[in-house]
Image (cartoon, rainbow, N blue to C red):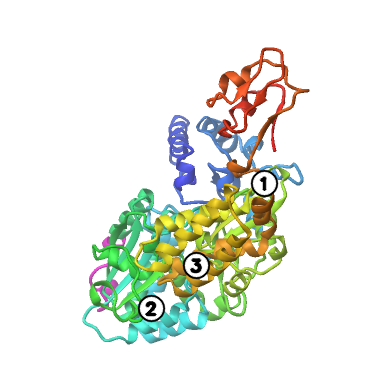
Amino acid sequence: MCCGTGCRASQSEQIIANLQEILLQKELQEEVQVVRTGCFGFCEKGPVIKIVPDNTFYTEVKPEDAELIVQEHLIKGRKVDRLLYLNPETQEHEPDSKHITFYKKQYRIALRNCGFINPENIDEYIARDGYLALGKAITEMTPEGVIQEITASGLRGRGGGGFPTGVKWNFTCKVEATQKYVVCNADEGDPGAFMDRSILEGDPHSVLEAMAINGYCTGASKGLIYIRAEYPLAIERLKIAIAQAEEYGLLGEHILGTDFSFDIELRYGAGAFVCGEETALIHSMEGLRGEATLKPPFPSERGYNGFPTNVNNVETYANIPVILLKGADWFQQIGTEKSKGTKVFALAGKVNNVGLIEVPMGTTLREVIFGIGGGIKDGKRFKAVQTGGPSGGCLTDKHLDRPIDYDNLIQAGSMMGSGGMIVMDEDDCMVAMAKFYLDFTVEESCGKCSPCRIGNKRLYEILDRITKGRGTLDDLDNLRNLGSVIKDTALCGLGQTSPNPVLSTLDNFMEEYEAHIIDHKCPAGQCKALLSYVIDPYKCTGCTLCARNCPANAITGERKIPHVIDTKLCIKCGVCMEKCRFGAITVQ
């Protein structure tokens, strides 16, 4: 049973309780085990149950379905067709998850254990080769040998920057110090992103194991996981995992009987997006304001409390144990020339199959959105996809066949980021979308540098004017010039990438900006200030329902006579259109 945050919010725990109660009634509790797992990824169809060994995949399960599953499937051996995934193309129920398009093109490395093991049971992790890589590293390999293997694999940081992981580890290894630290960045502040959270909820031991391997390589004895306090389930499972690893002698003093000692603590963040930047994160852990600082010196030289510190994000660590067990050559065969391995994405927005996916680098946006994602909801037209969260850019249909990797996305005016991918359709206004993301970065800026603190505020003000119909053509030049200056002069990654949504929408949707400025129209009908509500006199029956519900008293007319909307008084709330029973009110 999926018991990630999403499915728990849809009563998965109640489903488990019902299953266990019915199994007890049927005296099957010794023969059937109910296992809580992390996220299966198919969030659109949750709550999800997978029955093994026949691999049956039930979707959109409700608590009241528990008795039917036990009675029909477990006792009588008949699948419950109503709960099987319905293939929208064939209109047939799929017998198991292997036949579901959502999973066919995925290749799971970082998510290898999510949905397969109980994250609160270390024995299940060990049964899937858990901690074998740590044992191999500290008993069979030198620290330099491990770093060489990670470097040779081509693994790059999955937190957004894409810096070679082995190179970063080597920097920290070479620095002489009495104390060193290994840090896991689990802050994950992008809107619509839930990759790291799902890994920690579904497979926390993989991160602990990788951090210990990092500590062995770099000479660190202390590990710190910086996680936002808004992730209570991930925190709970991390605490359980740390306690279990310590009990088994896999964390703490003299791990596996060697001279290597390593322990891990949790540190909580308050949800500041800027603390995803490694220097701001370190300051936050030190009890200071989460502000970025100039580099060099890099954290590898002078980080937490002034000591050398190696920072990687959750997904980067999740790849480490597999690389050590299967080898750098194996990992090299996956992905593209400069971007090896797979990438986890949180696929969200106007797409049919919202969820958590993992695909090889080089997979195209088309394969992700229209293959794995099942296309656009309600048959609407695809308009854009925002990759990289607020730091990324909006890509259009001309980019759909572009392979997804670090360099390709940057060339297209976007970036990989940590893996957020939000799909938009024809009803989305791209000017408003750029304004939304800029509003987020303005709010999340630490304010330390002027380009970010002041420049982004000015960018937002220009966009706000445009969406309210008060923009000028000069504003377009100002947006582009100011955005370029901010990219070149801001202190940290937050400021340097914040203009990306603005610049990419200017490049790809200039006609929408011009429509807002020249025609005072929002083509997508999303900018309220540019909308006008009009009553069709031929359809209006004079029922007065719209007038009686208008909060601004902007509608006048006698009973049984067509009514009129005073556009000067109208606040564009849409209540009149909602209440009209005759379709007489339209938006222009």
Query: Which span of residues is magenta-colored?
Result: 245-261
Q: Which label's residue is closer to the chain start, 3 or 1?
A: 3
Asked whether residue 260 is drawn in magenta, I would say: yes
The residue that mark 1 highlights is: 521
Q: Nearer the viewer, residue 40 or 337?
A: 337
- Mainly helix, strand or loop, the magenta region? loop
How far across and how far down the image is residue 341, in percent?
56, 72
- Asked if residue 41 shows in the view, the reply is no
- Left/right placement of residue 279 relative to residue 461 reads left
Callout 1: SS: loop
Tell me if residue 334 comes above or below residue 314 in the rendering.
below
Report the residue marked by disc 3. Answer: 497
- The mark that comes first in sequence, 2 or 1, is 2
Give x and y (percent) for residue 555: 61, 23
Distance, label 2 to label 3, CA atoms, is: 37 Å
Q: Nearer the viewer, mark 2 or mark 1?
A: 1
Q: Return the residue at label 2.
A: 137
**Mark 2 or mark 3: which is in front?**
3
For image coordinates 58% across by 45% down, the residue present is: 44
The question of residue 206 being in magenta is answered with: no
Residue visible at 53% across and 30% down in the picture? 67
**Residue at left 42%, top 53%?**
201
